[in-house]
Image (tube, rainbow, N blue to C red):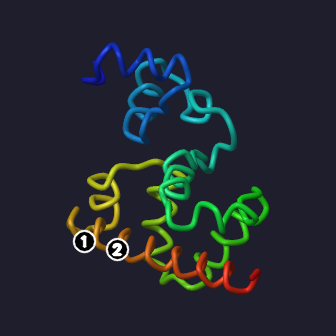
């Protein structure tokens, strides 16, 4: 009914993958539940920083130097610093993608943008994030 593979459902059940926002909405409708009942946590926000964590992990050139700032509090501070420097629309895009786990297509539809514009803005946001991390590493050295 959700047009996903059995293997993907198995990964959700095993906790190796999480459903994206559209699948959470579909599951909630299918089982007549609230979205928060599917994913847990607060009703107002589907918190899934899995993709954001992967992004931090993929910053290979920073891995050794950034080890000292990998604590959750510091990552939260980095994200907060990033968010304070973003436009309202960029904040919406960032939060929709990395905390609500919405697809590029869903974000584009929600914000009346093209999918490619969403992808470009996310690329720019990630570059700003890298700049913040570089600044913190310089300050710690």
Which image quadrant: the N terminus?
top left
Taking the image as shown, residue 119 lies to the left or right of residue 36, namely left
Q: Position of residue 69 (x, y in %)?
A: 73, 66
Taking the image as shown, residue 1 lies to the left or right of residue 91, namely left
What residue is shown with label 1? 117
Per the image, label 2 sits on a secondary structure element best described as helix
Q: Nearer the viewer, residue 80 or 110?
A: 80
Q: Residue at x 61, y 35 (%)?
A: 36
CB atoms of marks 1 and 2 within 8 Å: yes
Q: Residue at x 57, y 49 (%)?
A: 49
Taking the image as shown, residue 42 lies to the left or right of residue 126, namely right
Dot 1 surroundings within 10 Å: few (below 14), some, or many (20 or more)? Answer: few
Q: CA distance from mark 1 to mark 2?
A: 6 Å
Q: Residue at x 76, y 64 (%)?
A: 68
Per the image, label 1 sits on a secondary structure element best described as helix
Dot 2 surroundings within 10 Å: few (below 14), some, or many (20 or more)? Answer: some
Q: Position of residue 104 (x, y in %)?
A: 31, 55
Q: Residue at x 53, y 81 (%)?
A: 131
Q: Position of residue 37 (x, y in %)?
A: 61, 28
Q: Which mark is residue 121?
A: 2
Q: Nearer the viewer, residue 88 or 33?
A: 88
């Amino acid at each position: 009914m959700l047009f996903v593979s059995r293997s993907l459902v198995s990964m959700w059940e095993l906790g190796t993958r999480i459903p994206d926002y559209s699948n959470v909405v579909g599951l909630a409708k299918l089982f007549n539940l609230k979205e928060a009942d599917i994913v847990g946590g607060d009703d107002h926000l589907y918190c899934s920083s899995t993709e954001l964590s992967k992004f931090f992990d993929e910053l290979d050139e920073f891995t050794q130097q950034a080890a000292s700032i990998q604590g959750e509090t510091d990552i939260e501070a980095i994200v907060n610093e990033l968010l304070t420097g973003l436009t309202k629309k960029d904040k919406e895009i960032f939060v929709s993608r990395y905390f609500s786990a919405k697809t590029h297509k869903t974000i584009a539809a929600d914000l009346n943008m093209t999918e490619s514009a969403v992808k470009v803005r996310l690329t720019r946001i990630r570059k700003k994030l890298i700049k913040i991390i570089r600044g913190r590493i310089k300050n710690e050295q």
